[in-house]
Structure formats: C-alpha cells, structure tokens
Image (cartoon, rainbow, N blue to C red):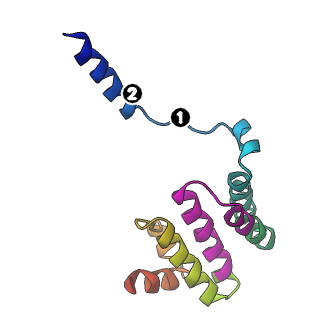
Amino acid sequence: MNKLLIVALLGLVAACAPVQPVAVSDLSNMPAEQALLTGIRLYEDGQYGPAERELQRALDLKLHAAKDVANANKYLAFVYCTSERLQACEQAFRAARAAQPDFALSKSEAGHPVWGPVYQRVIEQR
C-alpha cells in the first residue's frame, strides 16, 4: 500500500473511534452536568423539590449536550406531573423534544399513569 492510502485509512479509523466518556473527576469543570447528575439522583431518591432546583440549575448553566438538555427536561416533566402541574409537565416534554427531536420515553415510562397521558398528548400534537 502506498503511504497516502495508509494515512487516509488511519484517519478514517480515528474518526470512527468512540468518544471517550467523561470521568467523574472532569465534572468539577462542568457545573451544569454536575447539577444534572445531582438532580437525577435526588429525583430517584424521592426528593422532588431539591431535584427540581438542581435540574433547573443544570438548564440555567447551559448543558452542553442536547441529550442532557432533553434528560433534564424529562426529569423536570416527571416532577411537574407528580405534583399535578400538568401545563409545566407538558412544556418540559416539549422542551425535551425541541432539544433532541428523536427524544422518546422508554416503554415503561410512556405507560406511566401520571405523566404517560401528558407525554402522549405531546407526541400526538407534533
């Protein structure tokens, strides 16, 4: 093989290599992402008020990845729906889809009796 072809193939392989994940130690330089992780943990621990504050803080600090913006809005939608703030819940689902057009809840999440109908309404009105 000639050297130019080898260099081109190496470049192609490097371009296809998976992106390295972010280490937890790198989060100190990423306050929005740190707030997102904290908000999700608080939500999963049933601490919805503090979770809402951290998730909103993550959005205010400007998350870098569209998927993270969608996730922050998804969890905010869950918080809003569980506290019967259905308009805010719907708006959060819309924001998740605006950030990431292919955003979708898992089958079990979409079937949830509280936020499932709100999510379905957002999907149908698209």
Q: Which residues are magenta?
A: 56-80
Q: Quadrant of residue 49?
A: bottom right
Q: Secondary structure at mark 1?
A: loop
- Most foreground residue, 32 or 121: 32
Residue kind at label 2, given as amino acid type: Ala
Residue that mark 2 sits on: 14
Count of numbered badges drawn on the protein:
2
x, y percentage for residue 47? Answer: 79, 68
| Residue ID at (47%, 76%) | 111
| Quarter of the figure with the N terminus | top left
Left or right of 90? Residue 43 is right
- Most foreground residue, 93 or 32: 32
x, y percentage for residue 123? Answer: 41, 80
Queried whether the magenta region covers residue 62, the answer comes back as: yes
Mark 2 surroundings within 10 Å by alpha-carbon count, few (fewer than 14), some (14 through 19), many (20 or more):
few
Residue that mark 1 sits on: 20
Left or right of 115? Residue 62 is right
Residue 114 visible in the picture? no
Q: Quadrant of residue 68?
A: bottom right
| Quarter of the figure with the C terminus | bottom left
Q: Earlier in the sequence, mark 2 or mark 1?
A: 2
